[in-house]
Amino acid sequence: MHLIKELRIHVFTTLFVLICIVLQCDCRETEFNYVTCGSLLKLLNTRHNVRLHSHDVKYGSGSGQQSVTGVETVEDSNSYWRIRGRAAEPCQRGAPIQCGQSIRITHANTGRNLHTHHFVSPLSGNQEVSAFGEDGEGDDLDVWTVVCSGALWGRDEAVRFKHPGTSVFLSITGEQYGHPIRGQREVHGMHTANHNNYWRAMEGVFIKTSLDLPRHDEL
C-alpha cells in the first residue's frame, strides 16, 4: 500500500513538472513569436534569397545618397537594420509590430533610414531606394507600412513593406551591380505587389514581447 502511494506521488510530481515545462515553453515562444519595436534584424527577400544591405557607398546617379542593395552573404554586419516607430509616433520598445503599422527601418552601422523618392533606380529603371538621414533622423519619406496577413508581424511570416509617400513596395528583381559592389542586387520600389517584394525576418536580436499585447492606439 505504501509503495502504491509513493508511486502515485511520483507520477503526479512528474506530470506536474512536465506541465510546467510545457507552459514555460509556450510562454517563451509567445514572447518571441513577433517582430518587435527596437529589434535588430536582417531581412531576407524570399524570391531572390538575398538580404537587405547598405554601406557607405553612394549612388553615382539619381539622388547620390547612400546605396541600398541585396547580398547573398549571411555574415555581413552591414545587413543589420533596427525596427523603429515613426518620428511623430515612437513605438514602445518590445511592442509587437502590427500589420498596417507605419515604421522606420534604420541601418545599424550608418544610422541612416531606409528611404525612397521619385528618382529612377540605376539598373532596372524602377524607383530608387536609398539610406537617408543622420543618426536615425531623416524625413517623412523614411516611413514604410508593414503589409501582412494577420494582426501582428510574425517572425516566420513573409511580409511586404509599402511606402505610403510614393505607393511603391520594397522589391528586388535580380539586376546585379558591377564595380565597386560587384554581384550585389539592386533594391528598388515597384508599384505592383508581386513575389519580388516579400521579406522575412532572419538573424538578429529580437526584443522580448510583452504578453500583454498592446492595442494600436498604445503603440
Image (cartoon, rainbow, N blue to C red):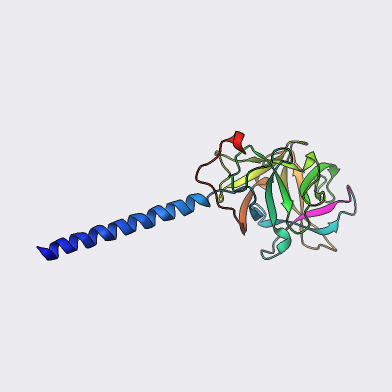
The mark total stands at 0
Q: Compared to 77, does 142 lie above or below?
A: above
Q: Compared to 104, does 53 lie above or below?
A: below
The span picked out in magenta is 62-71
Residue 80 in which image quadrant = bottom right
Which residue lies at the image location 63% right of the left edge and 37% below the top edge? 100
Which residue lies at the image location 52% right of the left edge and 50% below the top edge? 33
Which residue lies at the image location 61% right of the left edge and 58% below the top edge? 205
Q: Position of residue 173 (x, y in %)?
A: 73, 50
Q: Position of residue 23 (x, y in %)?
A: 39, 52
**Residue closest to the far left:** 1
Q: Where is residue 5 in the image (x, y as percent from the top left)?
A: 15, 61
Left/right of residue 10 with respect to residue 219 in the rendered view: left
Q: Quadrant of the C terminus?
A: top right
Residue 21 in which image quadrant = bottom left
Of 93 and 69, nearer the camera is: 93
Of 14 and 129, nearer the camera is: 14
